[in-house]
Each structure stands twice: as structure tokens, then as C-alpha cells.
Image (spheres, helix red, strand yellow):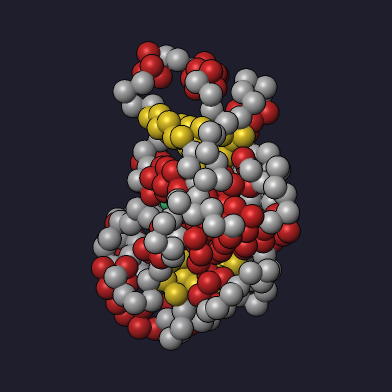
Amino acid sequence: MRHLLDTKSLTKTDALRILDVAEDMADTQQREMKKLPTLRGRTVVNLFFEDSTRTRISFEAAAKRLSADVINFSAKGSSVSKGESLQDTAQTLQAMGADAVVIRHGASGAPRTLATSGWITAGVVNAGDGTHEHPTQALLDAYTIRKRRYAGDSRGRDLFGVHVTIVGDILHSRVARSNVWLLSTLGASVTLVAPPTLIPQDVSLWPARVEYDLDEAIAAGPDALMMLRIQLERMNAAYFPTEREYSRRWGLDAGRLRALRGDSIVMHPGPMNRGLEISAEAADSPRSTVLEQVTNGVSVRMAALYLLLAGAERDTDSTDATRKGDAR
Ligand code: CP
């Protein structure tokens, strides 16, 4: 794998490979000594032009657990504020020896530009670009669903027969886009639920059904209900009358949580707007996988970095890195 830019172009074989390697990585994290020497001598740069808690920290944890050197770059406080371009910023970091660049950027397509422009030779991982994609989020979501569905070893398994309902601000959500493509590639069926104003115009081209009534969608008994954050920072118009009205019609409250099928899980990529798209009862319930998703994110990002930086050399078996007494 040279870059990880989206899930739309990810084949089922590649997606399952990442999820399976993530399981190997998760196994190593049960050991007392969690650190692997796999990426010793490699440098991973986290290049974040937008705010992040989970993604930035888990990429840093993932790289460090693989023994890579990590450089964290945040646009805030950098020479970007003096007008330095993406090209010059990236080339500066490459000159410091970056082998992989993990980039979050407000502009859809920025990671692809970085990967294809010839400015740098490092592998590029998209950590969220504008409203386009957030592939490692979708991979950790699929990983979480698969682990819950196949309680033991889920290696090699797809998501055929799984029904995932994604609720909320679909229009602005790169998480929704990445999930729709990945989940459908893995065989799951996807339903989107939102006010008509928060459904993208091109949704008919997506492999997903669209509904507008959350209670009907819950009555259909999805295996996973994924609540999305209302992205107020990307809204330049009124997409719903009031937050109270949004919450009443499309929020997951205690009543809707009770109506959800007994074994359905409640997901949210975070950060959550508690009381808006999800109530505290739902977010903190035993059916919520919110923190499990965060934990799984480290394993999935370890897998992505491993396949990007070591996978080509050791294309056969990630357990090379995880079984031979390598843990430090
Ligand atoms: N889910 C997610 O991308 O969270 P952060 O914005 O905190 O990275």
C-alpha cells in the first residue's frame, strides 16, 4: 500500500487486509510490553491543519507503538499563519526525513494533491479532508462492528448481512462518506437518516438508502446506529429550525434508545454534541461503542502505518512483526 487516501477506491481485499492486520496489532496491545520494533528508524509526520483530538493522538500512539519517530505539526502557531503553502510546508517536513505524512486538512482533496503532486516521496494517509473522506475512521468503525458481530476471531470476515444506519449531518460528514463506501464494499447495507437539508444532492449515486424519519429507521432494527456530529462550524446557513427541534426529531434520546433492537450498538465518531445529536443516556449506555471505537482506532492506525511503511517489504504476514518475540 503506497498511500491511504479514501475508502471509495479501497478493494474488499485491501480493506480486509487492513482489518486483519489491525487484529494482529490489537493482540500485541494485550501484552505487558506493547511496543514493537517494526518501524524503528522511520519517521511519521502528523500534519494537522484542522483541530483533532482522537485522530491525531491515536496516530501518534500508533506510530510510537511501532517504534517510529513522530513529528507533530499543527498549523496553528506554524508558518502557515505567515502564508506558507501546503507544498512548502510538506517539503520542509520531507527535508526533515518524513517517511509517512498523516494529513488532516480543511480542503477536500488536499491529501491526494500531496500524494500525487510529486512534491514529496513519503506515503500519505488521509486523516480527514474537508467534507470528502476520513478513511481510518471508517476502518475503525468497520473493525468495531466486525468485532462485536463475531465475538471471537473475526479475521477474514466481511460484513455481509449487517445493517448500519447513519444518522445526522450527512451533508458535511467525511465520516459518513467513508463509511458508506467501505461498509458497502464489505457487504453491509447502509441507511442514511437526516433532515432533507442535510442530505447531499448526489446521494442517489451512493450505495445507501435514504430515510427522513428516525423512529421508522430505529423500528427497522439496524445492527448499528451511528450518530453523527452536527458540524456547526461548516454550516453557513440554517439547515434546521432550532437545535431543540433537531434534537427532538433526529437526536438519539433515552426513549429512542429503549426502542432500539436489544443487541444493536450505538456508535459515534466523536467529538459528541451531548444533548444535540445524542443524549448522555445513549452516549454512556452499555450499548455505546464510543470509547471502544477510540481504542480500536489505535490498532487500525498501527495497521495502516505498518502496511504503508513496512508492508511492501514484508508483504506476506504482519505476524512477522507481531509474533517473533518482537514486542519490547
Ligand atoms: N473522529 C474524529 O476524527 O475525531 P477528532 O476530530 O477528535 O480527530
Q: Residue at x 55, y 41 (%)?
A: 39
Does residue 305 appear left or right of residue 13 in this picture?
left
Eyeballing the image, is 28 above or below 102? below
Can the viewer see residue 261? Answer: yes
Does residue 307 appear left or right of residue 196 in this picture?
right
In the picture as drawn, the residue positioned furthest to the bottom comes out as 262
Rendering coords of residue 165 (x, y %):
52, 69
Rendering coords of residue 107 (x, y %):
51, 32
Determine the image quadrant of residue 99: top right
Q: Quadrant of the N terminus?
A: top right
Rendering coords of residue 225 (x, y %):
47, 70
Eyeballing the image, is 288 above or below 123? below
Q: How many marks?
A: 0
Q: Residue at x 43, y 86 (%)?
A: 262
Can the viewer see residue 228? Answer: no
Does residue 50 appear left or right of residue 162 in this picture?
left
Does residue 271 appear left or right of residue 16 in this picture?
left
Q: Residue at x 36, y 63 (%)?
A: 291
Q: Residue at x 62, y 40 (%)?
A: 309
In this view, the residue in front, 189 or 28, is 28
Rendering coords of residue 180 (x, y %):
60, 59
